[in-house]
């Protein structure tokens, strides 16, 4: 449990199983925020993980911020903030449509 | 971080439609010593249990009667599993202790919600790993059940291993048609035949046309499921893959029935499996490749409502996204 934010430690979340050592874990968190950032940017959202406190920070362009504990929690939050689910099979990600926005 | 596979109890789920021969198969397997030292849980939807009498030889057996463990008796199952895990935790790891649980579901159970219940239980998630979902398929009656029963189809779609029972008495033409239908419903599952629980060879059904299953109200406008193999190797790392998969399961969890595969990460070889929207904590596999024929960095996605090409392009996009 982090005394500042009250998040209980959640070892064993499947998305974080790819790293066991401290440096690997930190590297994975930075890379995860980086991938998320480029996926969420077209939807007007930003993702940030400073590596110090648990969780991923998701913000809207208008400054609305939330912190989620795991990667899985990002998607329901993004759906709530943007009003629609972020579908990886959307033509935006698969290049199936021309002139997408 | 992820629990090591050897520290958790393996749970084998044995499902199948009513009268498909689950208990007969399990009784023979227990007799032959396949699930030696396993704790066997038998669930029956009816108030009066019968199966426990058939399985009387097993020394460690519990019966959950009067409700199906995927819905009404779910709380009983969770309580029983917690008790087993608690007893196991009190046993020294050097002593012989419970390593395997076999759950025979009632014929009315959908294995999906059972896996989901275990994954969402804050205690069981650290103690139990779902090893294999075995589904018994009635060699005589399955085709007619599949024509009308959405539950029968759901059970088959989710299986890792399909056992066609009564394979010795089913007519060869019908059996071939059933096998072709099963291969179409769940192309990712292993198929084997059984007669009174003993293995029997299955006929070659290549070239045999599958049964044209009518569209059921619940399945309306749903195309058939198919497997897609995705190679992660070039440029797709675990992090990009988890971002992609978690988003995919959130948006398309009803269409993606199963995801299975081994991924190489800095933490070792991870065996990943999902059942519908539920992802199991990955197991860390030994470094040397095993004899199960699993290929590293290859993921099989079984689902519907998309094309294999779209899936692959989407994954590449996510993997490339973080590098620009």
Image: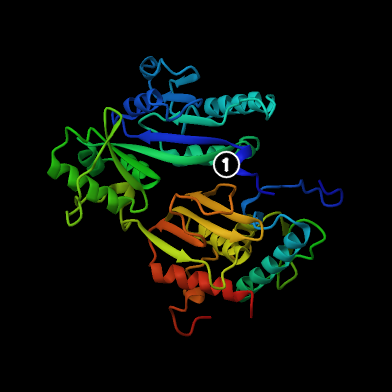
> Where, by quadrant of the figure, is residue A52 drawn?
bottom right
Residue drawn at point x = 24 percent, y = 47 percent = B179
Image position of B170 (left or right of B305): left
Quarter of the image for residue B32 reads top left
- Asked which secondary structure carries label 1, the reply is helix
Q: Is residue B40 visible?
A: yes
Residue at 64%, 68% in the rendered image: A36
Percent x, y of residue B25: 33, 29
Q: Residue furthest front?
A: B288
Residue lying at the far bottom of the rendered structure: A99
The local crowd at label 1, few if under 14, some if 14 to 19, many if 20 or more residues have their Cα within 10 Å, is: many
In the image, taking residue B48 as reference, residue B236 lies left or right, namely right
Please count the marks in the image: 1
- Chain ID at mark 1: B
Identify the image's colour scheme: rainbow, by chain, secondary structure or one colour: rainbow
* Residue B229 spot, x, y in % from top left: 42, 63
For the residue pair B310 and B300, the one nearer the viewer reads as B300
Q: Residue reaching furthest right? A: A3
State the residue at coordinates (53%, 74%): B317
Q: Is residue B131 above or below residue A77?
A: above
Residue B277 in view of the camera: no
User: Which percent across, then down, holds residue B111?
Assistant: 43, 38
Looking at the image, which residue is at 35% across and 47% down?
Answer: B190
- Say which of A47 and B101 sits in front: B101
Q: Is residue B103 left or right of residue A74?
A: left
- Residue B282 image offset from top left, x and y in percent: 58, 50
Determine which residue is flagged by label 1: B119
Location of the C terminus of chain B (image quadrant): bottom right
């Amino acid at each position: 449990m982090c005394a500042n934010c009250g998040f209980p430690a959640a070892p064993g979340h499947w998305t974080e199983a790819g790293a066991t050592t401290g440096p690997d874990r930190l590297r994975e968190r930075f890379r995860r925020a980086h991938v998320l950032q480029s996926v969420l940017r077209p939807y007007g959202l930003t993702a940030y993980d400073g590596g110090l406190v648990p969780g991923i920070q998701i913000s809207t362009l208008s400054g609305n911020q939330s912190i989620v504990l795991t990667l899985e929690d990002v998607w329901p939050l993004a759906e709530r903030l943007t009003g629609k689910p972020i579908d990886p099979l959307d033509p935006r990600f698969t290049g199936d449509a021309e002139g997408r926005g | 971080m992820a629990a090591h596979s050897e520290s958790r109890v393996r749970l084998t789920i044995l499902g199948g439609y009513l009268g498909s021969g689950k208990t007969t198969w399990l009784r023979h397997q227990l007799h032959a010593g396949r699930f030696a030292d396993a704790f066997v849980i038998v669930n029956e939807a009816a108030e009066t249990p019968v199966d426990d009498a058939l399985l009387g030889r097993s020394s460690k057996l519990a019966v959950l009667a009067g409700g199906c463990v995927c819905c009404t008796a779910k709380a009983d199952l969770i309580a029983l599993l917690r008790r087993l895990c608690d007893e196991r935790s009190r046993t020294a790891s050097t002593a012989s202790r419970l390593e395997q649980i076999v759950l025979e579901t009632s014929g009315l159970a959908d294995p999906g919600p059972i896996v989901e219940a275990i994954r969402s239980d804050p205690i069981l998630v650290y103690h139990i790993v779902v090893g294999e979902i075995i589904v018994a398929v009635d060699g005589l009656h399955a085709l007619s059940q599949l024509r009308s029963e959405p539950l029968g189809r759901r059970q088959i779609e989710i299986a890792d291993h399909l056992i066609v029972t009564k394979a010795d008495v089913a007519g060869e033409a019908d059996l071939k048609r059933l096998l072709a239908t099963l291969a179409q419903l769940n192309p990712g599952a292993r198929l084997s035949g059984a007669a009174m629980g003993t293995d029997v060879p299955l006929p070659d059904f290549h070239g045999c046309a599958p049964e044209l299953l009518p569209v059921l109200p619940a399945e309306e406008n749903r195309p058939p499921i198919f497997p897609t193999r995705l190679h992660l190797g070039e440029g797709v790392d675990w992090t990009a893959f988890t971002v992609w998969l978690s988003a995919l399961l959130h948006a398309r969890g009803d269409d993606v029935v199963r995801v299975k595969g081994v991924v190489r990460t800095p933490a070792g070889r991870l065996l990943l499996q999902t059942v519908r929207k539920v992802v199991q904590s990955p197991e860390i596999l030994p470094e040397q490749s095993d004899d199960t024929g699993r290929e590293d960095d290859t993921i099989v996605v079984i689902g519907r409502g998309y094309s294999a090409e779209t899936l692959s392009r989407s994954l590449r996009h996510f993997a490339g996204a973080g590098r620009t």
